[in-house]
Amino acid sequence: MPNPKRRHSQRRTAARRTHDSLRRAVLSECPNCHEPKLPHRVCAKCGKYKGREVIEVVEE
């Protein structure tokens, strides 16, 4: 197997790792119940997506 001839500098390693950080999840508001939810997902609170009921939610 080929091995690197020289080690990468700290600057080159850091430049590669700049995109490795985690980002906070972007939340949108449900138009039906106004709860925060992930975009393009069914709302866990009311069970609706694009104005129609997709899952049945049991209320406590």
Image: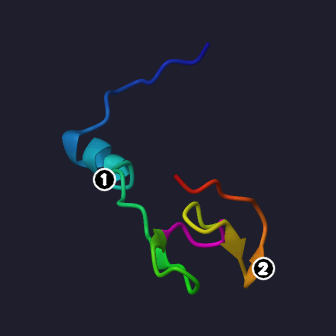
Between circles 2 and 1, the one closer to the viewer is 2
Q: For the point 54% across and 79% down, which residue is it?
A: 30
Quadrant of the frame with the N terminus? top right
Does residue 6 sit above or below 47 in this rendering?
A: above
Instruction: Describe residue 48's horizontal placement relative to residue 6 as left or right.
Output: right
Instruction: Give the main secondary structure of the magenta stretch.
Output: loop
Label 2, residues with CA under 10 Å away: few <14, some 14-19, many ≥20? few
Give me the residue at 45% from left, 74% from top. Answer: 35
The image shows residue 50 at horizontal and vertical percentages of: 73, 82
Does residue 39 appear to the left or right of 22 in the view shown? right
Instruction: For mark 1, give the secondary structure.
Output: helix
Q: Which amino acid does label 1 sit on?
A: Ala
| Relative depth, front residue between 17 and 22 | 22
Name the spot of residue 25 as percent of width and height, x first.
42, 62
Residue that label 2 marks: 52
Q: What x and y, as percent, mark residue 52? A: 78, 79
The region drawn magenta spans 37-41
Left or right position of 26 against 52: left
Q: Which amino acid does label 2 sit on?
A: Arg
Q: Distance between the residues labelled 2 and 1?
A: 46 Å
* Residue under numbered circle 1: 15
**Are circles 2 and 1 on residues that touch, CB within 8 Å?**
no
Left or right: residue 37 compared with residue 52? left
